[in-house]
Image (spheres, rainbow, N blue to C red):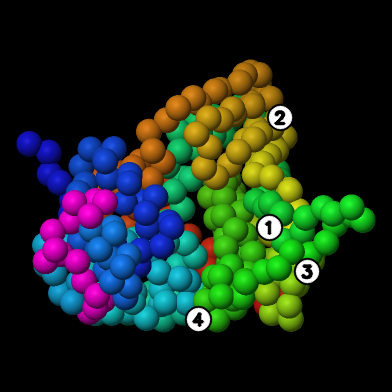
């Protein structure tokens, strides 16, 4: 009989709902407990996902004490990740935290320096890394289909703020109570969407054996703000060890799409939808030109849950590749911090 990993979710927003649904498609995991400060959400989720009443918690401290849970998924607003991570580490509990794990590199360093950290499973929720197109991408790069890696460009953004009227574009009303437009909640486009582009850049750069990815600089930063502290459009260039660079773009104001292009000295690979496609095409222009089409796949969150649950069963303390490693979580936090603080 397969071992089943038991999960608890802390924080019950939209992303938690999508994550919770994925357990219906999981092979080796079960959702057994939920925690939220909202009694209404707790009751609704509990009913929808058949969670026993004794496993519904209004108090985060109480769910942490539940020793039947093998791993906790933190789906709270970005500003609440850090304190809860510290509490879970103090109790030696395994953690998957929704991206971005941290608001600053200082938060990340404090967690990484905790006494228990090396012995606890810790990962960050970049679910796109588990999509079959990423595995195909990695295999083609490793097999030399496009030669030695030279550069890449990756984007994530769409217009959430402006709409057309008879006289052109105008700014729509935006609600600062919404997380993405509230700096106190960890809002802004770099933390919300830009972190995907930095994580992809770091993962691809890690495939180039001749460089040290920890030796990087973030330059050519251009950022637009909706208010004085809410970034809504930004681009930058990450230069790794002066031997590979990535152009990154993210936006709440422009339809810049979800494309990633990786260029080698003998060709390139294009991903039309990098982040959460139900259907996708990988275009490889290199030693052998080919199109790799991915039709309906298993729920991408279920793929993430299955892979991480397998890591837990095997007593690993970080996500297996291509999941994000502990080292890359720290480096990614540093890249994001440098990008935001330019």
Residue 314 image point, x, y percent: 20, 49
Characterize the local packing of mark 4: few (<14), some (14-19) or many (20 or more) Cα atoms within 10 angstroms: some
Q: Would you name the residue on which mark 4 appears?
A: 106
Residue lying at the far left in this picture: please name it. Answer: 1
Observer-side mark, 1 or 2, equals: 1
Characterize the local packing of mark 2: few (<14), some (14-19) or many (20 or more) Cα atoms within 10 angstroms: some
* Mark sitting on residue 266: 2
Q: Earlier in the sequence, mark 1 or mark 3?
A: 1
* Mark sitting on residue 160: 1
Observer-side mark, 4 or 1, equals: 1
Observer-side mark, 1 or 3, equals: 1
Discs 4, 3 touching: Cβ within 8 Å: no
Q: Is residue 51 among what the camera can see?
A: yes
Q: In the picture, which quadrant includes the N terminus?
A: top left
Residue 146 colored magenta?
A: no
Residue 58 colored magenta?
A: yes
- Residue drawn where x is 73% and y is 48% of the image: 256
Q: Give the camera-side residue of 105 and 144.
A: 105
Observer-side mark, 4 or 3, equals: 3
Magenta-highlighted residues: 47-61
Q: How far is mark 1 from mark 2, CA to CA?
A: 38 Å
Left or right relative to 227: residue 57: left
Q: Earlier in the sequence, mark 4 or mark 1?
A: 4
Q: Earlier in the sequence, mark 1 or mark 2?
A: 1
Q: Secondary structure at mark 2?
A: loop
Q: How far is mark 4 from mark 1, CA to CA?
A: 30 Å
Residue 11 image point, x, y percent: 35, 67
Q: Would you name the residue on which mark 3 appears?
A: 224
């Amino acid at each position: 009989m397969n071992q089943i990993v038991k999960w608890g979710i802390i924080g019950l927003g939209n992303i938690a709902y999508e994550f919770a649904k994925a357990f219906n498609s999981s092979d080796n995991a079960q959702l057994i407990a939920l925690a939220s400060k909202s009694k209404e959400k707790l009751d609704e989720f509990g009913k929808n996902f058949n969670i026993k009443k004794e496993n519904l918690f209004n108090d985060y401290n109480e769910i942490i004490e539940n020793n039947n849970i093998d791993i906790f998924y933190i789906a709270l607003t970005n500003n609440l990740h850090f304190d809860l991570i510290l509490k879970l580490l103090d109790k030696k509990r395994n953690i998957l935290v929704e991206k971005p794990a941290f608001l600053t590199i200082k938060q990340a360093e404090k967690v990484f320096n905790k006494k228990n950290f090396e012995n606890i499973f810790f990962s960050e929720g970049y679910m796109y890394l588990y999509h079959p197109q990423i595995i195909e991408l990695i295999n083609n790069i490793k097999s030399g289909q496009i030669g030695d890696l030279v550069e890449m460009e990756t984007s994530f953004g769409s217009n959430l703020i402006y709409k057309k009227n008879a006289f052109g574009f105008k700014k729509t009303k935006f609600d600062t109570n919404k997380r993405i437009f509230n700096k106190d909640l960890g809002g802004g486009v770099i933390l919300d969407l830009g972190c995907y582009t930095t994580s992809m850049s770091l993962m691809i750069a890690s495939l180039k054996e001749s460089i040290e990815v920890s030796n990087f600089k973030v330059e050519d930063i251009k950022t637009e703000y909706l208010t004085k502290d809410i970034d809504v459009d930004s681009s930058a260039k990450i230069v790794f060890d002066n031997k590979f660079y990535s152009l990154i773009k993210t936006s709440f104001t422009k339809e810049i799409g979800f494309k990633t292009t990786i260029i080698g000295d003998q060709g390139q690979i294009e991903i039309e939808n990098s982040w959460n496609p139900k259907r996708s095409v990988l275009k490889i222009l290199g030693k052998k030109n080919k199109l790799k089409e991915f039709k309906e796949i298993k729920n991408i969150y279920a793929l993430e849950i299955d892979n991480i649950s397998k890591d837990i069963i095997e007593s690993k303390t970080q996500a297996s590749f291509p999941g994000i490693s502990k080292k890359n979580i720290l480096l990614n936090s540093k890249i994001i911090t440098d990008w935001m603080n330019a």
